[in-house]
Image (tube, grey):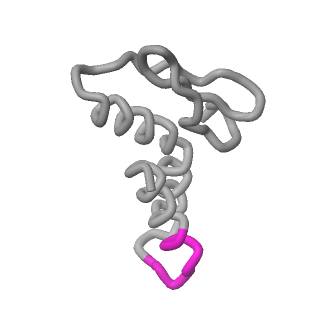
Amino acid sequence: MEYTKGEWENNRPLIEGRFLDNAYKSIAIIVPTDKEEETEANAHLIAAAPNLYEALKAIEAAKGSFNDVSIIRNMVNALAKAEGK
């Protein structure tokens, strides 16, 4: 699967909405909703997409064996990023 590699960041507010990018290129512009908290949550979730994808791929590859602590750590970190923590 091809997608923009690198850490996606929710780091540049626009006058309206949020701008997502990585070190190399623009990823997305998040159009604001009625609630600022919801717009921010959407931006965090989209920014976490590559981390969530990679964590799920690692879980799939582990085939139910969670002896590798890094798999759990990656999953926890991806969820935290998705939640804006």
- Residue 71 covered by magenta stretch: yes
Residue 77 in the image: x percent, y percent?
50, 62
**Image quadrant in which the C terminus is located:** bottom left
The extreme front residue here reads 15
Residue 72 in the image: x percent, y percent?
48, 73
Q: How many marks?
A: 0
The extreme bottom residue here reads 67
Q: Which residue is depicted at the point 53% across and 21% down?
A: 28
The extreme right residue here reads 24
Q: Which residue is depicted at the point 43% across and 33% down?
A: 43
Residue stretch in magenta: 65-73
Q: Nearer the viewer, residue 61 or 29?
A: 29
**Image quadrant in which the N terminus is located:** top right
Specify the quadrant of the image occupied by residue 22: top right
Q: Nearer the viewer, residue 69 or 44?
A: 44
- Residue 18 covered by magenta stretch: no
Q: Is residue 30 left or right of residue 6?
A: left
Residue 27 in the image: x percent, y percent?
59, 24
Depicted 74 relative to depicted 85: above or below: below
Q: Nearer the viewer, residue 83 or 11?
A: 11
Depicted 55 relative to depicted 26: above or below: below
Depicted 69 relative to depicted 9: above or below: below
Residue 46 in the image: x percent, y percent?
45, 35
Q: Which residue is depicted at the point 62% across and 31% down?
A: 3
